[in-house]
Amino acid sequence: MNNPPRKLQLTDLETLAQAAECLKVLAHPHRLRMLQMLRQGDFTVGELAESCGVASHVASEHLRLMQRCGFLESVKEGRRRYYQITETHLESILECIEARFGVKKVNTPTTRRAPSSP
Amino acid sequence: MNNPPRKLQLTDLETLAQAAECLKVLAHPHRLRMLQMLRQGDFTVGELAESCGVASHVASEHLRLMQRCGFLESVKEGRRRYYQITETHLESILECIEARFGVKKVNTPTTRRAPSSP
DNA sequence: TTAATATATCGGAACCTTACGACTTATCCA
DNA sequence: TGGATAAGTCGTAAGGTTCCGATATATTAA
């Protein structure tokens, strides 16, 4: 518990405020589950909602929030909308979280997307 | 945008709720700054408060919160209290955040702790 | 002992987040 | 066209977070 004098590696507070905003968006169990799924494939709002056990309009709100802050993009196909991860750094943060809290393989809990035919 | 059928790696929602709690605690610019500093040395409440530009009783509240959720431990020495990181996984998450948002070397912005003498 | 310093606690105000029901819009299909 | 399905929007109520001033406690120094 002895500090030799040296320079500190710090991030300025304004940037940390941005980082905190992103972490707030991550900090919700259903949003984490959705991101965990979207890392592994494309899913519709309804599929993500079902896996989280919430109404689809609630899932929709979470997804819009994540889209607004740059985590996701979406593509509409017919009356379905597929979300995808666009923020590449999410990968490593989600890995950290999984390393700390664990994951397990489960059978696909929702209908998976059928190959798209234009 | 085509998903071959395969198993998903998911974390159960209860565990994700715990993870979300931890992320909420991380999600504050002053707490991030404090953790960034504590990764690099031992600091008192007052030093951490000064670096964040907040009153020391506000810093104290943040530190207690992080202690309650298992991120930190503290040691009292005289009328000062030194906090230290105990949750080892914080290291990797902070690295992810720094990789995404950046850090820069700055001159020690606060008084550094003098070698302790029992 | 008294004064000053360092930290912590408490109650309350302002603000933000979430979930919900009701409603809207867009698309598909019979 | 009309009904069903998928997704999104809006207002609101409940609950949580953060900061602040006031105050309390512990420790050191004079």
Image (spheres, coloured by chain):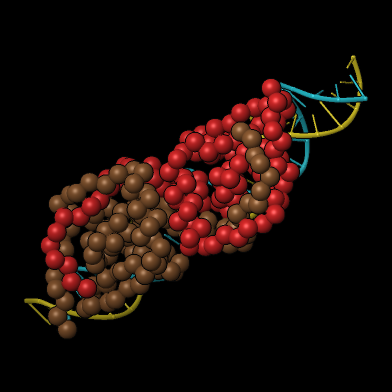
Chain colours: A red, B brown, C cyan, D yellow
Residue A107 in which image quadrant: bottom right
User: In the image, is A21 to the left or to the right of A116?
Assistant: left
Across and down, in percent, residue A111 comes to: 73, 43
Residue B72 in which image quadrant: bottom left
User: In the image, is B54 to the left or to the right of B93?
Assistant: left
Across and down, in percent, residue B35 comes to: 32, 59
Across and down, in percent, residue A49 comes to: 68, 45
Compared to C16, does C2 lie above or below?
below
Q: Quadrant of the C terminus of chain B?
A: bottom left
**Foreground: C5 or C27?**
C27
Q: Quadrant of the N terminus of chain B?
A: top right
User: What is the total number of numbered labels drawn onto the structure image?
Assistant: 0
Across and down, in percent, residue A70 comes to: 48, 35
Compared to D29, does D21 lie above or below?
above
Residue C3 in which image quadrant: bottom left
The residue shown at (28%, 53%) is B52
**Foreground: B112 or D23?**
B112
The residue shown at (23%, 77%) is B77
Residue B64 shows in this picture: no
Residue B9 shows in this picture: yes
The residue shown at (14%, 59%) is A6
User: In the image, is A101 to the left or to the right of B99?
Assistant: right
The residue shown at (45%, 56%) is A96
Compared to A67, does A27 lie above or below?
below
